Structure formats: C-alpha cells, structure tokens
Amino acid sequence: MNNLIQKALPHFVAIAIFLAACAAYFSPQLQGKVPQQSDIIQYRGMAQEAKSFQERTGETTLWTNSMFGGMPT
C-alpha cells in the first residue's frame, strides 16, 4: 500500500500543479469577466445608420456608408 502511494504521489503533485496553473490562468473567466470583442462593438455602431434610416423612413436600407466607403447592408 505504501509503495503504491509513493508511485502515485508524483502524479498527484503534477495534477495539482496543472489545476493550480489552470485556475490562475482562467481566474478572470471564473470571476465572470468576459473579454471585449471589438468587432461586436463596431458592428453596433455601424448598424446604427441602418436602424435610424428604417425608423425615419420605414424602409430597409440596402447600402451603408459607415464601412469601407460604403457597402451593402
């Protein structure tokens, strides 16, 4: 029994080190924090032009000038 524990101890230590490293690396996610996604933020700004046009006229716009000098919506 004692021999089995001696053989398994390095494995348990390695697992504990990996778990501690994972907990340290992912601590922001474990706290509920999320990274800022700039493409989502930029999309909301660019879509505002299409939303305001539709609210103003009731029609769906087919073109936007807020990206790359203009492109389809």
Image (cartoon, rainbow, N blue to C red):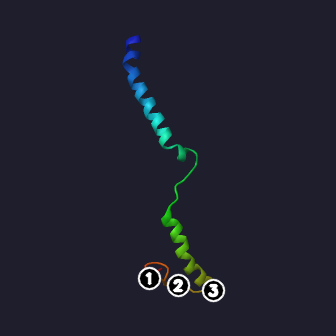
Q: Which quadrant does the N terminus fall into?
A: top left
| Numbered label attached to residue 21 | none
Residue that numbered label 1 is attached to: 69
Real-space Cα separation, disc 3 to disc 1, in angstroms: 22 Å
Real-space Cα separation, disc 3 to disc 2, in angstroms: 11 Å
Give the image location of residue 22, x and y in percent: 46, 39
Q: Amino acid at mark 2?
A: Thr
Mark 3–mark 1 CB contact (< 8 Å): no
Q: Counting other residues with Cα less than 10 Å from the Cα at mark 2, is it few (<14), some (14-19), or many (20 or more)?
A: some
Real-space Cα separation, disc 2 to disc 1, in angstroms: 16 Å
Quadrant assignment, res 47: bottom right
Task: Tell me if 1 is positioned left or right of 43 in this view.
Answer: left
Q: Counting other residues with Cα less than 10 Å from the Cα at mark 3, is it few (<14), some (14-19), or many (20 or more)?
A: few
Give the image location of residue 34, x and y in percent: 54, 53
Q: How many numbered markers are drawn?
A: 3
* Front residue of 17 and 57: 17
Q: Secondary structure at mark 1?
A: loop
Is residue 1 at least partly visible in the picture? no
Q: Secondary structure at mark 2?
A: loop
Mark 3–mark 2 CB contact (< 8 Å): no
Q: Is residue 46 above or below residue 11?
A: below
Q: Amino acid at mark 3?
A: Arg
Give the image location of residue 27, x and y in percent: 53, 43
Give the image location of residue 36, x and y in percent: 52, 59
| Numbered label attached to residue 56 | 3
Nearer to us: label 3 or label 1 = 1
Residue that numbered label 2 is attached to: 61
* Front residue of 37 and 3: 37
Give the mark nearer the N terminus: 3 vs 1: 3
Q: Residue at x 50, y 38 (%)?
A: 23
Residue that protrudes farthest toward the top in the picture: 2
